Amino acid sequence: MSEVAALERELRATLQGEVRFDAGSRAAYSTDSSNYRQVPLGVVLPRSADEVVKTVALCRKYAAPLTSRGGGTSLAGQTCNVAVILDHSKYFNAVLEVDAGRRLARVEPGCNLDALRKSALERAGLTFGPDPATHDRNTLGGMIGNNSCGVHSVMAEFYGPGPLTRHQVLQLEVLTYDGLRFTVGPTSDAELEGIIAAGGRRGAIYAGMRSLRDRYAEEIRRRYPDIPRRVSGYNLDALLPEHGFNVAHALVGTEGTCVVVLGATLALIDPKPERALLVLGYPDVFSAGDHVPEILEHRPIGLEGLDEEMIFGMRKKHLHEENLGLLPEGKGWLLVEFGAETRAEASAQARRLMGELQRGHAAPQVKLFEDPQEAQRLWEVRESGLGATALVPGMRVTHEGWEDAAVPPAALGSYLRGFRALLAEFDYHTALYGHFGQGCIHCRIDFDLATDPGIQK
């Protein structure tokens, strides 16, 4: 503890940003939106990249671990650690540049997603593709750490570089624990050879990555699943020659375990400003999942799913009850959003899908919402998923921890059936909802974590 106290004193003497080692701050930063709790050594709120460099240097001096934190919206404990927590969100949060011609933005890691989207729309008529439900709270640094997607990731897949945050990242400015500060991105063969030949710490890092790539290239090609929502583990496939030895893409999703991100250059896309929302009602959520591949052929900009358990939770908690009557009849629903430059074009896309579905086998119940205010009421229902499934009165307590399970969209219906059967076998319950267009499921399960029998089970 004496070393922690010495680290705190040096940080206070060195930084203009906030240094918080008091018990209250450590308690507040001990958890995020997950089940996990790890009391940190202390918290630093840096004001600039240079202050991050100084913080890392002092942590290295005292052998203190580091964890970067954005908005604290992680559901799997990514920002919890017995470490010095770097919270970039208060000061180190600017939109540095929006370039309409090159369709890019430069941001500091604490920049809030909605702040970037507002700035990009006002300055360039563009937007950032991935948009998690926590868009008003989460940060770009956190999205880079998580490799986030969101409701409109299918828009980024169909009309932009790809569905995940990884695909939007053009360059990252990074800092290693031993103090090396440099910019990473795609690396040509000639650039790679030059960096390694130049030697030094950077050359050694790149040589190590190349060696890792060469040793495991065929295993990576053979075993990494080709699915749109693949976020588990490290993106080693980004180092393959066919992917341009893209070190920035390899670092996205590493949860701060490899570097501290000091800044990012990100791709922007056309926002498809005029929208039409088609809501489809099915007998169950499994049937809704079965229809996802057919609907994706129509290139929607959003494709979300939810089940009757989520709606039950909303009614029990009186969340957006006035909006639930807008849903068509059913026990499983898809929200299918189309976007275009004009409302008439967006509506025409939705009506083409309506016509095809109504001619097909097992046609769903259908409602089309062309009024933006009515459509927003349905999106409020979807965005309430996490709140609707937590602490439902009269129901067992549910827990995070099974978030973002993902499969190929074509397998979604069968996966949901198998998953529900597995839950029933062990007498567990959950609502099922999520980014169905990405084959990505959100759920909170009522594990009993409070008794010995429950934990054994």
Image (spheres, rainbow, N blue to C red):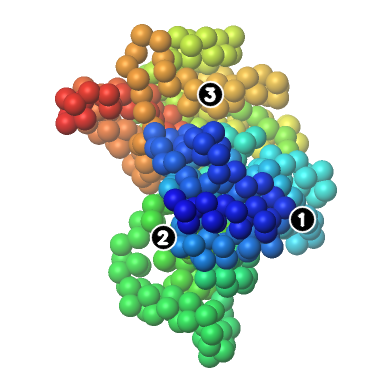
Q: What element does badge 3 sit on?
A: loop
- Asked whether residue 262 is in view, the answer is no
**Type of the residue with mark 1:** Leu
Nearer the N terminus, badge 2 or badge 3? 2
The amino acid type found where label 2 is placed reads Tyr
Q: Under tag 1, what secondary structure?
A: strand
Q: Residues within 10 Å of mark 2 (few under 14, many from 20)?
A: some
What residue is disc 2 on?
234
* For discs 3 and 1, the disc positioned in front in the rendered view: 1
Residue at horizontal 60 percent and vertical 54 percent from the top: 9
User: Residue at the location (70% across, 24% down)?
Assistant: 372
- Of pointers 3 and 1, the one earlier in the residue sequence: 1
Quarter containing the C terminus: top left
Q: How many marks?
A: 3
Mark 2 → mark 3, Cα distance in angstroms: 30 Å
Name the residue tied to disc 3: 384
Q: Residue furthest front?
A: 2
- Amino acid under disc 3: Ser
Q: Is residue 407 above or below residue 328?
A: below
**Residue placed most toward the observer, 423 or 5:** 5
Q: Residues within 10 Å of mark 3 (few under 14, many from 20)?
A: some
Q: Nearer the viewer, residue 61 or 367?
A: 61
Q: Which residue is mark 1?
A: 96
Residue 153, x across and y down, in percent: 55, 44
